Amino acid sequence: MAKPEQTSQPSPVLFFNTARAYQSTAALKTAIELGLFTAIAEGNSTPADIAHHWNGAERGARILCDTLVVLGFLTKHSGSYSLTADSAAFLDRNSPTYIGGAIDFMTSSFMESAFGCLTEACRKGGTAVGGGGAVSPENPVWVKFARGMANLMRLPAELMAQRVAADVKQSGGAPVRRILDIAAGHGVFGITLARHFPGCEITAVDWPGVLEVAKENAAAAGIAAQYHTIPGSAFDVDYGSGYDLVLLTNFLHHFNAETNEHLLAKVHAALREGGRAVTLEFVPNEDRISPPDSATFSLVMLACTPAGDAYTFPELEKMFRNSGFRSSEVHALPPSFSHMLMSRK
């Protein structure tokens, strides 16, 4: 729900809308599960047509669609519904940029459990989920993440790859032949870089079950022969050495600064001289309340991890400097909500 405009009179609207925000999430999840956006894209525009498409009640179709109009996912004219540009691009299952599958991870039982005990997490300063929360060894939620979030990450992966390729070309340095992808997940970031650096070898590190998803995606992209895996904890396994690039995508925010510096020292040792560590993160401004998507990500880490956080660029730069990197720079990747750090050995 939209934040109400500030007026001279106090208003309960912000409280009311925030307290029932879970209902908006439920409406979106239901629409995705029922294939509502795909049905409308295929020409089913009235409640009767939509209900017939999913063999359901017209009343249910009307109320759900009206709610999605209010939320901004649909438009309505003369009793018929249409997709917004965003919904057409991202929520129609036939769209090449469909991201609806991410709802399975974002509303998973693990996430619901973590936020269900947020009060206790606030009291203790870290997740109240037992066993270390999201960073517990081989947590099955990461397989769900890998399967659900791949399409959502394709845009920042492409933007990141373009930035890296431009930097490599501009520097005139050695070509990129070997890439280490730490906590690879779905593998989309390494796979995307492989398109920009044809013939390069990708080595992915993650839990065994997660790597099965990454290997499937690598095979689908036609790079199975050059895609290698190291199963296990990124903190424990032997990376090898001589890599041109090391990827750290959406990983550092799970841990405190001391733990990250331990990992980054290991990354530094795995890079060849002049190599680059490429990091993707939610990076709030130093006020820690802007931009909204990055600033509020700290709450996700409070609920889900013992000590993770959304780090500012000065905080991240210090971690890399303390781990031996000579320089780091940050780049926004609009229209995604991600930032990319380039750190040089």
Image (tube, rainbow, N blue to C red):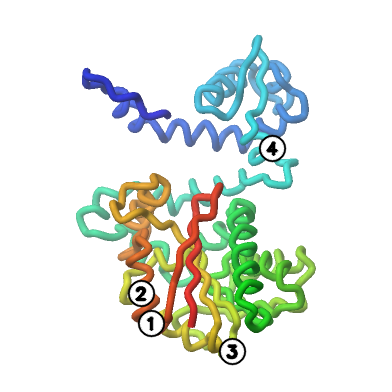
Residue 319 badge: 2
- Mark 2 or 4 closer to N-term? 4
The vertical placement of 269 against 7, above or below, is below
Contact flag, marks 1 and 3 (Cβ < 8 Å):
no
Nearer the camera: disc 2 or disc 4: 2
Identify which amino acid the numbered label 4 is placed on.
Asp
Q: Which residue is mark 1?
A: 323
The vertical placement of 94 against 325, above or below, is above
Nearer the camera: disc 4 or disc 1: 1
Distance (Cα) linking label 4 and label 1: 44 Å
Distance (Cα) linking label 2 and label 3: 22 Å
Nearer the camera: disc 4 or disc 3: 3
Q: Which residue is mark 4?
A: 92
Q: Residues within 10 Å of mark 1 (few under 14, many from 20)?
A: many
Q: Residues within 10 Å of mark 4 (few under 14, many from 20)?
A: many
Contact flag, marks 2 and 4 (Cβ < 8 Å):
no
Identify which amino acid the numbered label 1 is placed on.
Ser
Contact flag, marks 1 and 2 (Cβ < 8 Å):
yes
Rendered residue at 39%/76% (across/down): 320
- Mark 4 or 3 closer to N-term? 4
Q: Quadrant of residue 252?
A: bottom left
Identify which amino acid the numbered label 2 is placed on.
Met
Rendered residue at 73%/46% (across/down): 96
Secondary-structure class at tag 2 = helix
- Mark 2 or 3 closer to N-term? 3
Contact flag, marks 2 and 3 (Cβ < 8 Å):
no
Distance (Cα) linking label 2 and label 4: 41 Å
Distance (Cα) linking label 4 and label 3: 43 Å
Rendered residue at 55%/82% (across/down): 275
Identify which amino acid the numbered label 3 is placed on.
Gly
